[in-house]
Image: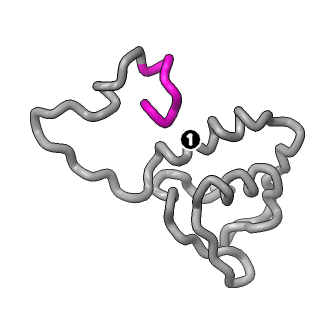
Amino acid sequence: MHAPGLAGLWGREIPLAGGRTATVDGAYVRDSILQPKRDVAAGYEPIMPSYDGLLSDGEIQELTAYIRALGAGPRASRTLGRPPLSSRVPGAARDRSPAMV
Protein backbone atom coordinates (compact mmCIF):
# COMPACT_ATOMS: atom_id res chain seq x y z
CA MET A 1 0.00 0.00 0.00
CA HIS A 2 1.27 3.43 -0.91
CA ALA A 3 -1.04 5.39 1.38
CA PRO A 4 -2.56 5.01 4.81
CA GLY A 5 -6.05 3.51 4.98
CA LEU A 6 -8.80 6.09 5.37
CA ALA A 7 -11.38 4.09 7.34
CA GLY A 8 -11.42 5.10 10.98
CA LEU A 9 -9.10 8.09 10.62
CA TRP A 10 -11.61 10.95 10.95
CA GLY A 11 -11.03 12.93 14.14
CA ARG A 12 -7.93 10.97 15.13
CA GLU A 13 -4.51 12.40 15.72
CA ILE A 14 -1.98 10.84 13.36
CA PRO A 15 1.82 10.96 13.33
CA LEU A 16 3.46 12.89 10.51
CA ALA A 17 6.91 12.64 9.02
CA GLY A 18 9.35 14.66 11.08
CA GLY A 19 7.75 13.77 14.40
CA ARG A 20 4.79 16.16 14.27
CA THR A 21 1.12 15.16 14.54
CA ALA A 22 -2.11 16.31 12.92
CA THR A 23 -5.80 15.77 13.56
CA VAL A 24 -7.66 14.33 10.58
CA ASP A 25 -10.42 16.87 10.00
CA GLY A 26 -11.77 18.91 7.10
CA ALA A 27 -8.78 21.25 7.00
CA TYR A 28 -6.26 18.40 7.09
CA VAL A 29 -8.04 16.50 4.30
CA ARG A 30 -8.31 19.63 2.14
CA ASP A 31 -4.63 20.48 2.66
CA SER A 32 -3.65 16.88 1.91
CA ILE A 33 -5.51 17.03 -1.42
CA LEU A 34 -4.17 20.44 -2.45
CA GLN A 35 -0.68 20.31 -0.83
CA PRO A 36 0.03 16.61 -0.28
CA LYS A 37 3.75 16.99 0.36
CA ARG A 38 3.20 19.44 3.24
CA ASP A 39 2.01 17.01 5.95
CA VAL A 40 2.98 13.47 4.97
CA ALA A 41 1.83 10.62 7.21
CA ALA A 42 4.76 9.01 9.04
CA GLY A 43 6.10 5.93 7.29
CA TYR A 44 4.87 6.89 3.81
CA GLU A 45 6.63 8.43 0.85
CA PRO A 46 5.33 11.79 -0.48
CA ILE A 47 4.15 10.34 -3.81
CA MET A 48 0.62 11.77 -4.02
CA PRO A 49 0.24 14.46 -6.68
CA SER A 50 -1.43 17.77 -5.93
CA TYR A 51 -5.00 18.18 -7.14
CA ASP A 52 -4.84 21.97 -6.85
CA GLY A 53 -6.67 23.40 -9.85
CA LEU A 54 -7.97 19.96 -10.88
CA LEU A 55 -10.80 19.57 -8.36
CA SER A 56 -13.52 22.10 -7.61
CA ASP A 57 -14.31 23.14 -4.03
CA GLY A 58 -17.47 21.04 -4.30
CA GLU A 59 -15.49 17.94 -5.30
CA ILE A 60 -13.09 18.46 -2.40
CA GLN A 61 -16.06 18.78 -0.06
CA GLU A 62 -17.50 15.53 -1.45
CA LEU A 63 -14.21 13.71 -0.89
CA THR A 64 -14.02 15.13 2.63
CA ALA A 65 -17.60 13.99 3.34
CA TYR A 66 -16.73 10.51 2.07
CA ILE A 67 -13.67 10.23 4.31
CA ARG A 68 -15.69 11.53 7.26
CA ALA A 69 -18.37 8.92 6.49
CA LEU A 70 -15.73 6.20 6.81
CA GLY A 71 -15.77 6.98 10.52
CA ALA A 72 -13.52 7.72 13.41
CA GLY A 73 -12.76 4.24 14.63
CA PRO A 74 -14.27 0.82 15.01
CA ARG A 75 -17.93 0.77 14.11
CA ALA A 76 -20.24 0.61 17.07
CA SER A 77 -22.64 -2.29 17.14
CA ARG A 78 -26.24 -1.33 16.68
CA THR A 79 -29.26 -2.39 18.67
CA LEU A 80 -30.92 -5.47 17.25
CA GLY A 81 -34.22 -4.79 15.55
CA ARG A 82 -33.42 -1.18 14.74
CA PRO A 83 -32.35 -0.45 11.16
CA PRO A 84 -29.11 1.47 10.64
CA LEU A 85 -29.44 5.22 10.15
CA SER A 86 -28.56 4.94 6.47
CA SER A 87 -31.66 2.86 5.80
CA ARG A 88 -33.85 5.55 7.36
CA VAL A 89 -32.51 8.32 5.10
CA PRO A 90 -34.88 9.07 2.19
CA GLY A 91 -33.86 8.22 -1.35
CA ALA A 92 -31.84 5.42 -2.86
CA ALA A 93 -28.27 4.99 -1.64
CA ARG A 94 -26.85 5.93 -5.06
CA ASP A 95 -28.68 9.29 -4.89
CA ARG A 96 -27.36 10.27 -1.47
CA SER A 97 -24.26 12.12 -0.46
CA PRO A 98 -21.45 9.79 0.67
CA ALA A 99 -21.95 11.20 4.17
CA MET A 100 -25.49 9.81 4.21
CA VAL A 101 -24.90 6.32 2.77
**Coloration mode:** one colour
Q: Quadrant of the N terminus?
A: bottom right
From which residue to which does the magenta span run?
93-101
Image height of 66 relative to 13, above or below: above
Residue at 76 percent across and 37 percent down: it is 57
Residue at 27 percent across and 52 percent down: it is 76
Q: Which residue is mark 1?
A: 65
> Horizontal placement of 24 versus 20: left or right?
left
Q: Quadrant of residue 31?
A: bottom right
Residue at 44 percent across and 32 percent down: it is 100
Image height of 6 relative to 84, above or below: below
Q: Quadrant of the C terminus?
A: top left
Q: Quadrant of residue 72?
A: bottom left
Expressed as whole percent of the image width and height from the top left, the position of residue 60 reads 71, 40
Image height of 56 relative to 25, above or below: above
Three-letter code for the amino acid on which mark 1 is drawn: Ala
Expressed as whole percent of the image width and height from the top left, the position of residue 9 reads 51, 59
**Crowding at label 1, few (<14), some or many (≥20) Cα neighbours within 10 Å?**
some
> Horizontal placement of 64 versus 10: left or right?
right
Image height of 72 relative to 23, above or below: above
Residue at 47 percent across and 43 percent down: it is 69
Count of labels shown? 1
Mostly what secondary structure, the magenta segment? helix
Magenta stretch encompasses residue 77: no
Task: Say what secondary structure mark 1 lies in.
Answer: helix
> Horizontal placement of 70 versus 80: left or right?
right
Magenta stretch encompasses residue 94: yes
> Horizontal placement of 44 versus 84: left or right?
right
